[in-house]
Amino acid sequence: MSLADANIIQGYSIKETAERTGIPEDTIRYYEKIGLLPRAQRKGNSHRIYSDQDLEMMKLISCLKKTGMSLDDMRPYLNLSLDSDLSEYPELHEMILNHKQKILEQIASLQQIVDFIDTKIEHGNLGPQTCELTGDTRKMPERRKR
Amino acid sequence: MSLADANIIQGYSIKETAERTGIPEDTIRYYEKIGLLPRAQRKGNSHRIYSDQDLEMMKLISCLKKTGMSLDDMRPYLNLSLDSDLSEYPELHEMILNHKQKILEQIASLQQIVDFIDTKIEHGNLGPQTCELTGDTRKMPERRKR
DNA sequence: GTATAACTTGGAGTCAGCTCCAAGTCAATC
DNA sequence: GATTGACTTGGAGCTGACTCCAAGTTATAC
């Protein structure tokens, strides 16, 4: 039996999951600890095992992190990706439209920086009011080193 | 003499600067403390006074923060906005083009989230591989509460 | 001359999000 | 049955970016 077959049957170890998602083992455990991920299935009542669906969820977390969402704020999105019917939760629906709006503003903000850089490169002088955004400054992702 | 005239002549107090830039007083002092802002001019060797140029610099900081840049990473940009001739520093020039590239990737990433949200709203199912980005996950802004 | 207000400083505390560690379990190999 | 390796847990420590505080100064208002 190949490794791939084994994975389909028994799932991925935390190490393999870390490799496949790019999320460190410690961080995966941390996400479980804070309840961002559901308690993982266990093998012999100790080692965690993950399914492809679990990996997709982790990839979604990485993805939402890139948009600057806090771990707390992404909880509803993660539920969403499981019990799929959005229209049943109008409150959630609105939250998401709201976040979409914020992302669009972020995009606009980023675009202004790109413009600023381009102007700077072409000319050499910076006009004032480079970036005036309607939204707040909150809700953006953090940086990681290493 | 009006307040506006007084500002032109003697500059803005830290309080006024905070109001005009939206950056809290403590944070302005913090930026000076870590050397992100140059040591402010003093009045009677104590109170800080700021010029319009100083305010522009602070607005640029806010703006760059929105793009997810760390305070450390924005130092070269801040120098850039002062001693304007970019072409004299090829190293810096490259750094900036580099960052521009990252911002474009961020924009792409955010756009994918928007697409994901739209798809989610229309259909209700999420196809896998929602967001695969070439760049790293680092270099994004932090969130603030309150 | 005293109270008030706006500032100054240095340093401590906070928060999110990890990241690391020590001590322990458990299965497989030598 | 001892060693090895991959895991487990709880909890401590770390980093960036603030945010708050206490103690002191200085100018103006009463």
Image: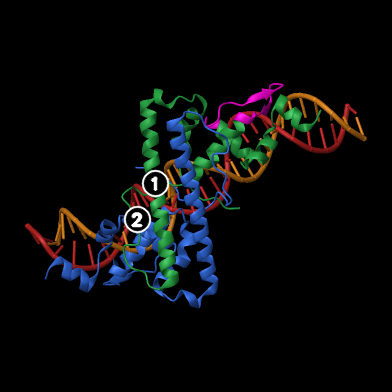
Chain colours: A green, B blue, C orange, D red
Q: Is residue A16 above or below residue B41?
A: above
Say whether residue B26 is visible: yes
Residue B36 makes an appearance in the image: no
What is the CA distance from the residue labelled 1 to the residue labelled 2? 30 Å
**Residue A104, numbered circle:** 1
Q: Is residue A8 magenta?
A: no
- Per the image, label 2 sits on a secondary structure element best described as helix
Q: Are marks 1 and 2 in contact (CB under 8 Å)?
A: no
Q: B6 above or below C20? A: below
> What percent of the width, then of the height, locates residue B140?
48, 51
Q: Which residues are magenta?
A: A33-53
The image quadrant that residue B5 belongs to is bottom left
Tell me the SS state at disc 1: helix
Name the image quarter holding the N terminus of chain B.
bottom left
Residue nearer the viewer, C14 or A100:
A100
Position in image of residue D10 (x %, y %): 59, 30
- Residue type for callout 1: Leu
Mark 2 highlights which residue?
A: B26
The circle on residue A121 is none
Query: What quarter of the picture does the C terminus of chain B occupy?
Result: top left
Is residue B81 or residue D26 the one in the foreground?
A: B81
In this rendering, position of residue D9 left or right of residue B121: right
Mark 1 crowdedness (10 Å alpha carbons): few <14, some 14-19, many ≥20: some
